[in-house]
Amino acid sequence: GNSVTQMEGPVTLSEEAFLTINCTYTATGYPSLFWYVQYPGEGLQLLLKATKADDKGSNKGFEATYRKETTSFHLEKGSVQVSDSAVYFCALKRANRDDKIIFGKGTRLHILP
Amino acid sequence: EAGVTQSPTHLIKTRGQQATLRCSPISGHTSVYWYQQALGLGLQFLLWYDEGEERNRGNFPPRFSGRQFPNYSSELNVNALELEDSALYLCASSLGPRGSYEQYFGPGTRLTVT
């Protein structure tokens, strides 16, 4: 079946450090891939997405590249800020009528000043 | 443009009672999705409604049910509440299965069962 596996947290970094959150997926066909972010006390926000192989999604300094050969969609940011502290979810969605999003379990990120 | 709204923000019920959660999608969106975010379990897909019909449901018992109204708003009903139903329930909307892939999420309803 379709599934998403992401690194377990919490991840704790100092401000301005480089961030990588690993995400790999299992899916038949050609899913779209997403990163969502959940700030404390809030709902989910779409951070970035990629819809086909080799696409790079980017937003707010975050980037992720759709790697079909390694079935990965790792999230990276060159210099994190305290305001980036949140829970990050990797997710996929099949391009058919089964329209649900399949989420990873989430990675909690703490950025220390 | 208003986003997805959910009510109530918090809901406290006792075991065995029924809970009703409400969601209003973004204007123009016809699909509504419900997800459960239980502690330690991540986000689990519950239900999907489009054009007033249930299109798909996740691996949840029948006491989780819902409906979509003609104005595309939706209700999630949870009957015979159990302690493990305590979770954040998120609603999302999208343009529909033939539209954008993006689902826009509301702030959630936190259900606590005591």
Image (cartoon, coloured by chain):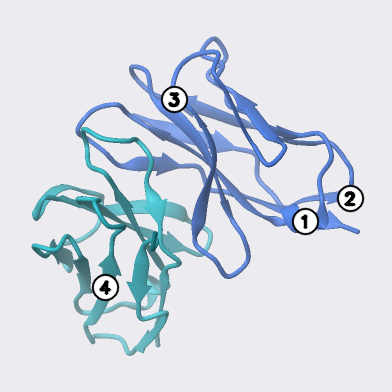
Residue B59: percent from left, percent from top? 25, 51
- Label 2 secondary element: loop
Q: Image height check: is A76 above or below B47?
A: above
Q: CA distance from mark 2 to mark 1?
A: 10 Å
Q: Residue furthest front?
A: B1
Q: Residue furthest top?
A: A69
The kind of residue on which mark 2 rests is Glu
Residue A83: percent from left, percent from top? 76, 57
Residue B16: percent from left, percent from top? 24, 85
Q: Count residues near mark 4 (Cα–Cα under 10 Å), then give few for <14, some for 14-19, many for 20+.
A: many
Are the residues flagged by discs 1 and 4 from a single subunit?
no
- State the residue in front, B81 or B26: B26
Q: CA distance from mark 4 to mark 2?
A: 39 Å
Residue B22 badge: 4
Q: CA distance from mark 2 to mark 3?
A: 33 Å
Chain A as rendered: colour: blue
Instruction: Give the mark nearest the N terminus, 2 or 3.
Output: 2
Residue A26 badge: 3
Q: Count residues near mark 3 (Cα–Cα under 10 Å), then give few for <14, some for 14-19, many for 20+.
A: some
Are the residues flagged by discs 2 and 3 from a single subunit?
yes
Question: Is B28 situated left or right of A56 in this image?
Answer: left
Q: Is residue B65 visible?
A: yes
Chain B as rendered: colour: cyan
> On the image, numbered disc 2 is attached to which residue?
A15
- Label 3 secondary element: strand
